[in-house]
Image (spheres, rainbow, N blue to C red):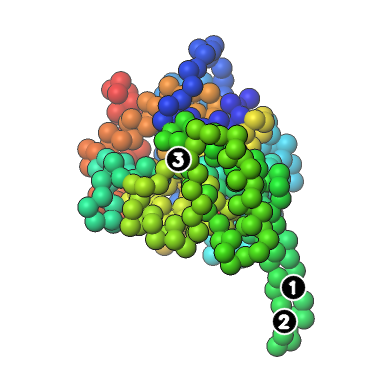
Amino acid sequence: MGAGGNAGPHVVRRGPSRIPRMATTHRIALLPGDGIGKEVVAEARKVVDALGLQIEWTHLPWGSDYFLEHGQMMADNWVETLRAHEAILMGACGWPTVPDHIALWGMILKIRQVLDLWANVRPARLLPGIPTPLANRTAADIDMVFVRENTEGEYAGVGGRSHTGHPHEVGIETAVFTRVGIERIVRYSFELALTRSGRLVSTTKSNASRYGYVLWDEIVREVAADFPGVTVEKVLVDALAARMVSNPGSLDVIVASNLFGDILTDIAAAIQGGMGTAASANTKPGSSEPGLFESVHGSAPDIAGKGVGNPIAAIWSAVLMLEHVGEPEAAARLMRAVEAVSLAGIRTRDVGGTARTSEVGDAVVARLLAGA
Ligand code: IPM
Ligand code: MN
């Protein structure tokens, strides 16, 4: 089984030493999903196959096409199917033919919640050669990691609707914050901060709310007592959004609630060159549940099927996946190849190039085969 979702060197700057192991076959579920998810996951698989590891892929045809045929996004036995794997490499989920809340609660949000993949780790680092929209900023200024709480908060799925059709129809969406849920994500973030700069930002909106984020702030204070080596700063989420743009170099590890983490990581993606470059790991640290690795971007119906989507986010997600399954050297090789390719200018149009999706994947493979 996987390494329990411990963050690897592409998140951790100063990783623990690893014990060499015998080569094992990794069972990976491939879940391309919708739209460009299919195109970018194909590239991610292609580059992982070029690493020469023993991998057994299971292709799962779930998503919006599957929904139109079967009335549900995933097969009935989806939990057992996923649990028979160490990791899931997912593309994207959501398509105009299926209402978003049905597609997303039928797949990605369901997987996160049912498998209790509570840690969503999203590195936001500017790769060499990729342009950032921030003036006068370089790769040295943009190297953050977001730790997003991934199962509760504003995504708890708790609420209701009533008075349907009346002028006073209501929709209530309740954010749920539990001590267990907050403490585990906060503790994880402190541990991650220890392996990097020792600086952690915790972000809430506890000035305007009275319960959930106030509890969050209290737990951060409690946990901080166990981590004298970490400097923790409490930053309100609105101020943090501004600071990410005005002074990204002042930020390293950031822990956020589910919705705030969602929003902030889109800003972070833009800063690091766009949605096409942003990767994520959804894991349950310390457990043997499979991790789910996916691009932060969606299915992009506007460019789907055209072969122009950026595969970097999916490939980077595969790097995080390799760390999760205990293949840090392969992960590092793959990341170096991605960096070399982007530096060499083989980039899709969203990041200032002219290459097609498959050309970027081919270039990464060529780099790997050349022994880079
Ligand atoms: C993300 C996505 C999802 C989220 C959507 C597709 C439900 O935006 O992974 O960031 O909001 O978590
Ligand atoms: Mn999002």
Q: Residues within 10 Å of mark 1 (few under 14, many from 20)?
A: few
Give the image location of residue 154, x and y in percent. 63, 59
Q: Quadrant of the C terminus?
A: top left
Q: Residue at x 56, y 17 (%)?
A: 24
- SS at circle 3: strand
Q: Which residue is mark 2?
A: 169
Q: Which residue is mark 1?
A: 161
Using the image as rendered, state which of residue 199 and residue 92 is in the foreground.
Answer: 199
- SS at circle 2: loop
- Mark 3 or 1, closer to the camera: 3
Residue lying at the far bottom of the rendered structure = 167
Q: Is residue 111 left or right of residue 20?
A: right
* Mark closest to the chain's N terminus, 3 or 1: 1
Reply above or below: 355 against 45.
below
Q: Residue at x 52, y 13 (%)?
A: 19
Q: Is mark 3 within 8 Å of ligand 1?
A: no
- SS at circle 1: strand
Query: Image quarter for residue 1?
Result: top right
Q: Which residue is mark 3?
A: 199
Q: Residue at x 64, y 57 (%)?
A: 214
* Mark closest to the chain's N terminus, 2 or 3: 2
Using the image as rendered, state which of residue 344 and residue 263 is in the foreground.
Answer: 263
Q: Amino acid at mark 2?
A: Glu
Residues marked 1 and 2 touching at CB (< 8 Å)? yes
Q: Residue at x 71, y 50 (%)?
A: 178
Q: Amino acid at mark 1?
A: Arg
* Mark closest to the chain's N terminus, 1 or 2: 1
Q: Is mark 1 within 8 Å of ligand 1?
A: no
